Image (cartoon, rainbow, N blue to C red):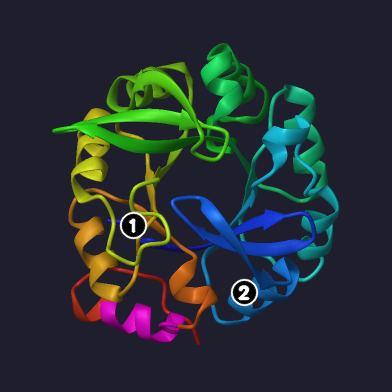
Amino acid sequence: MSNTRLIARLDVKGANLIKGIHLEGLRIIGSPAEHAQFYYDQGIDELIYMDCVASLYGRNSLGELIKKTAENVFIPMTVGGGVRSIEDVAHLLRCGADKVAVNTAAVGNPQLITEIARRFGSQCMVLSVEAKRVGNQRWEVFTDNGRESTQLDVVEWVRKAAALGAGEILLTSVDREGTRKGFDLELVEAVAEAVEIPIIASGGMGKTQDLVDVVGRGADAVAMADILHYKRASLNDIRAGALAAGIRVRTYE
């Protein structure tokens, strides 16, 4: 049994690290590079950088930030937002990213999933899913930072994406994001039952018990933002709580 990965999610708008609720009402937190360095120093397992305004400009603009981070941070970095082509992926990998997260472009052209997986390996191709609950045990895929409806069923979409070569799923509950009310456990469980690739649960963590609960429903990793940015709990506290609950996480000395 592998360790549950603890991941810091950093949503970026321009030069700023930001945080919102339901992916809206964005508030400036500070410097993304400084926060990335701090979390690295505290022993975070991975980083996720998401360009929150990439859809407005049709491109990901995090290349220079990734280069700067990669100079002193030596853990896996996933970069998403505005990734639309093989060329975009190649550029971000050259800048220092290890994986790319693709949402809008994958919905518009599912074959892009296969192209990225074949060219760079399936471990590089992370399917980013922004999910909104639309009924009992039903969720819809949204794009453009949770603004645009796609009419796609989340469970059907992740099955298709996994078959096309996606190596991992970044599963964000738009309903829970920024609320500190815990993850959408039913959503995570439904996706975990549908696919065999790793799932990163994102959206809603307010306390360590939320991590314990979502791992119990099938999450392989947990992406954290609010709880870390606002220092509601330290990484040491989160690790200790996970270990006390019998969840394997990487210990940090």
- The residue sitting at 24% across, 41% down in the picture is 187
Outermost residue on the left side: it is 136
Give the residue displayed 73% in from the left and 63% down from the top: 16
Q: Is residue 171 above or below residue 244?
A: above
Asked whether residue 82 is in view, the answer is no
Asked whether 229 or 220 is in front, the reply is 229
Dominant SS of magenta comes to: helix
- 221 vs 136, left or right, is right
Alpha-carbon neighbours of circle 1 within 10 Å: few (<14), some, or many (≥20)?
A: few
What's under tag 1, amino acid-wise? Ser
Residue 52: x, y in percent? 64, 47
Per the image, is 26 magenta?
Answer: no
Q: Mark 2 belongs to which amino acid?
A: Tyr
Q: Position of residue 110 (x, y in %)?
A: 53, 15
- What residue sits right under mark 1 in the picture? 2
Q: Position of residue 252 (x, y in %)?
A: 48, 82
Indicate which disc residue 81 carries.
none
Image position of 84 with respect to 224: above or below: above
- Image position of 41 (left or right of 130): right
**What is the crowding at mark 2: few (fewer than 14 residues within 10 Å), some, or many (at least 20)?**
some
Q: Which quadrant holds the N terminus?
A: bottom left
Magenta stretch: give its range.
232-241
- Does residue 42 show up? yes
Magenta stretch holds residue 240: yes
- Mark 1 or 2, closer to the camera: 2
- Depth check: 238 or 152 in front? 152
SS under mark 1? loop
Q: Give the structural element (helix, strand or loop) at label 2.
A: helix
Instruction: Tell me the quarter of the picture where residue 207 sits.
Output: bottom left
Image quadrant in which you'd find residue 92: top right
Q: Which residue is mark 2?
A: 40
